[in-house]
Amino acid sequence: MKKKVLYFILPALAITIPLVLFLINRYQHPISPVTSETLDSMKIVKIPEPELLYGLPKDSFLIEGSRIKRNQNLADIFLKAGIDYPTIHKIVQKTKPVFDVRKIKVGNRYSIFLTDDTTKQLNHFVYEIDNTDYMVVSLSDSINVYRDAKEIVTVPKTATGVITSSLWNAMTDNGVHPVLAIELSEIYAWTVDFFGIEKGDYFKVMYDENYVDSTSIGVGQVHAALFHHRGRDYYAFNFKEDSIWNFFDEEGQSLRKAFLKAPLKFSRISSKFSNNRLHPVLKIRRPHHGVDYAAPSGTPVYALGDGRVIAKAYQKRGGGNYVKIKHNSVYTTVYMHLKGYAKGLNKGDHVQQGQLIGYVGTTGLSTGPHLDFRVFKNGRPVDPLKIDAPPVEPVKKEHRAHYDTFIKPLRLNLNNLALKLD
């Protein structure tokens, strides 16, 4: 009987005694409440986030970086890092859905992540595919291959410049990314004659430039531009309508015309439209109802507008290889002295504006490589440099009020940009 009583008393004492001691201690040393002053005086220690490289913690590895050398392949790199052939074969099989490792390029960067211990085992291999994308081969547990991209930082910028020789030179002279010249030439392809830009013409532009690892990787979106050409201001505002971005002028008219301003890029006019020109080969005076664009042999030639190819042949009278495109009931264009035609182009084909149709050459009666470009309006030759092509659809009426509000600050900022003068 006494043993049974002890079985009950001893557990009760084991619980009661510590509780009594805790209450006595609490009474003798009461806990002070935490006041707002106390909280204010407390320092919050922030644990720094690990520094990442390709999404991997740098402090956890020994990292060695290099560039792909001539005749070097993936197997060379992995063998040097202690990976055997069977594992390399598995890695190559895993990479196929992600990146074709046979296409690794000489000069591209790669990094190997080794364990930070005496074994220095390869845990991760990273190959930079281009400026942004990279492939990761992870070997920590099992073989895992994936593709990721570096963060692109977009920086808003403005640029201005006065043209003294060419748009390209104006960009480089003012420390502006020269690719912006191509962007502007495409934006204004239907409104500004870039083969006739004059000394003193100028530009102002608001755009984004993209950076990766503090290095510029090119021009992003152009938001607004002003191109002053032959005494006239040409505005361009990038406006989103029905989920599509297009450039419009200050009146809401589209900058995209029915025709390009010229059928090729970056050349010079060697001969203009004339009714009495001295032929350089025949040495006689006769009409030259076209514009000659001097350009290197092989320069791409593009269709001025949408249309149908009604002729693709060799003109024995002097035009050489040529293409004729009928755009509508009014306009027809002809491209002569071609070196060759775009692959697959045939008579009867429908072409789109800006589509490649051939290459500059010197076939027929020609003293050097150039494009003889002609335009016919209602069957009669007209000066290609004086075509007043109709625009495509303007900003819709229901969006016009929003458009006017949208471009107001952009136009003000453009006008306030100071020109950089030499």
Image (tube, helix red, strand yellow):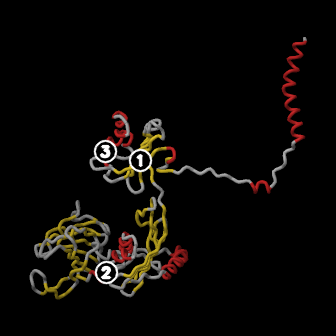
Q: N-terminal of the two: label 2 or label 1?
A: 1
Q: Give the residue number, with chain letter if any, for mark 2.
A: 165
Say which element carries label 3. loop
Label drawn at residue 64: 1
* Left or right relative to 48: residue 310: left
- Which is more toward the observer, 382 or 328? 382
* Left or right relative to 283: residue 309: right
Q: Which quadrant would the N terminus be assigned to in this image?
A: top right
Q: Give the residue number, with chain letter if any, for mark 3.
A: 73
Give the number of the mark in front: 3 or 2: 3
Position in image of residue 216 (x %, y %): 42, 64
Image point 45% across, 59% down: which residue? 213
Give the number of the mark in front: 2 or 1: 1
Give the number of the mark in front: 3 or 1: 1
* C-alpha distance separating marks 3 and 2: 46 Å
Position in image of residue 297 (x %, y %): 19, 69
Say which element carries label 1. strand
Position in image of residue 289 (x %, y %): 20, 82
Q: Is residue 105 positioned above or below 322 on the image?
A: above
Please state which amino acid type lies under the numbered disc 1.
Glu
Q: Do residues under tags 3 and 1 come within 8 Å of each other at their CB atoms?
A: no
* C-alpha distance separating marks 3 and 1: 17 Å
* C-alpha distance separating marks 2 and 1: 47 Å
